[in-house]
Image: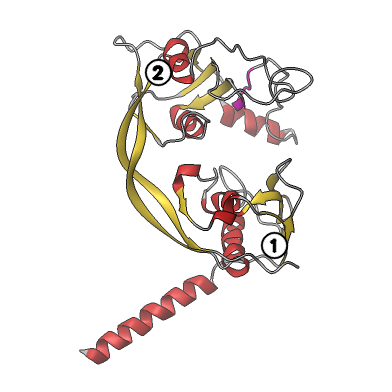
């Protein structure tokens, strides 16, 4: 029996090592500390198998690596040393060949490569688990099931639009002009969300990351299909002023006396967020080390 257990354990260890060895890695990668402080930052998967990370904390990089295709929300990353939220890094990496995009985002292999880089260069140790955490439940606010005046069923077929643009050699649908609603997708500013042809699942994903909510949202509206909507509210924290207004460049003005996000959802979209508790899939960060720069 003992011999059988030893053999089984060895087989399991070999399987784990084999799985790790089979995960793709970048052909070349450079990691450097960024000491410029909070400011412009970005994380982009670019054509030709390139990854460019600028002025990002390790926690936000982990969020992108393990969220596919949307980064994990803040509430889904638990634990880790304090420097994960303060130290900032630049990463430049290149994969072999030209990995092709997935059906809903960057090449899936690029996420795996970034995971490999985090484990190799930052010695990241983590595990997944499910915890009972505060959540919100999204329901219809009106007993008759009617939506609010700022939300309507969409007549835009985004899949057909993308196919048509690609057939003509174009890219994704063009970005809308200031004040216009996107045909497909959402544009979000502090106090304003404007979306075209979005499913409730996509709306829930975006709302859960919106400042002032910060919890998972479970959809119990029963709504199907895609919707156009415009949501205007007063954020809990007003953004820093810029020369052309009271928010980021190009953002619509914010009414300091407007409705809260929760009230606006009910009055404008006919939707309601109710607090509850439920199971949430999270990543627990056990440890990480500052990388050796190159």
Viewer-proximal residue among 56 and 51: 56
Label number found at residue 289: none
Q: Is residue 39 depicted above or below 23 in this figure? A: above
Distance from disc 1 to disc 2, alpha carbons, whole Å, reads 44 Å
Q: How many marks?
A: 2
Furthest residue in direction right, as rendered: 243
Residue 182 position by quadrant: top right
Label 2 sits on a secondary structure element that is: strand
**Spot occupied by residue 239 in the image (x, y as percentages of width and height):** 64, 25
**Spot occupied by residue 284 in the image (x, y as percentages of width and height):** 43, 56
Viewer-proximal residue among 231 and 10: 231
Viewer-proximal residue among 146 and 102: 146
Asked if the residue under mark 2 is in contact with the one under mark 1, i.e. CB atoms within 8 Å, the reply is no
The magenta-colored residue range is: 181-188
Residue 118 position by quadrant: bottom right
Q: Which residue is mark 1?
A: 95
Q: Is residue 108 visible?
A: no
Furthest residue in direction bottom, as rendered: 3
Tell me, yes or no, whether the highlighted magenta stretch contains residue 116.
no
Label number found at residue 271: 2
Q: Earlier in the sequence, mark 1 or mark 2?
A: 1
Which quadrant of the figure contains the C terminus? Answer: bottom right
Label 1 sits on a secondary structure element that is: loop
């Amino acid at each position: 029996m003992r011999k059988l257990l030893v053999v089984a354990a060895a087989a399991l260890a070999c399987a784990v090592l084999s799985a790790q060895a089979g995960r793709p890695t970048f052909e070349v990668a450079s990691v450097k500390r960024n000491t410029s402080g909070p400011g412009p930052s970005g994380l982009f998967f670019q054509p030709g198998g390139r990854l460019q990370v600028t002025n990002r904390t390790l926690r936000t990089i982990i969020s992108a690596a393990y969220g596919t295709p949307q980064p994990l929300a803040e509430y889904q990353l638990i634990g880790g040393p304090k420097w994960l939220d303060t130290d900032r890094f630049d990463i430049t990496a290149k994969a072999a060949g030209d990995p092709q995009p997935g059906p809903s985002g960057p090449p899936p292999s690029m996420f795996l490569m970034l995971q490999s880089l985090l484990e190799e260069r930052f010695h990241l140790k983590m595990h997944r688990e499910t915890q009972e955490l505060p959540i919100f439940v999204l329901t219809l606010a009106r007993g008759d099931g009617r939506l609010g005046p700022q939300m309507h069923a969409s007549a835009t077929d985004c899949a057909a639009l993308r196919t048509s643009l690609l057939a003509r050699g174009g890219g994704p649908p063009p970005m809308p002009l200031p004040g216009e609603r996107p045909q497909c997708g959402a544009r979000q500013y502090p106090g304003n969300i404007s979306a075209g042809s979005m499913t409730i699942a996509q709306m829930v994903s975006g709302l859960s990351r919106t400042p002032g909510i910060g919890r998972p949202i479970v959809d119990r509206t029963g709504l199907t299909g895609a919707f156009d909507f415009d949501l205007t509210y007063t954020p809990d924290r007003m953004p820093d002023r810029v020369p052309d207004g009271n928010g980021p460049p190009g953002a619509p003005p914010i009414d300091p006396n407007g409705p809260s996000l929760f009230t606006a959802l009910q009055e404008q979209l006919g939707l309601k967020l109710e607090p509850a508790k439920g199971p949430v899939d999270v990543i627990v960060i056990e440890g990480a080390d500052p990388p050796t720069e190159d």
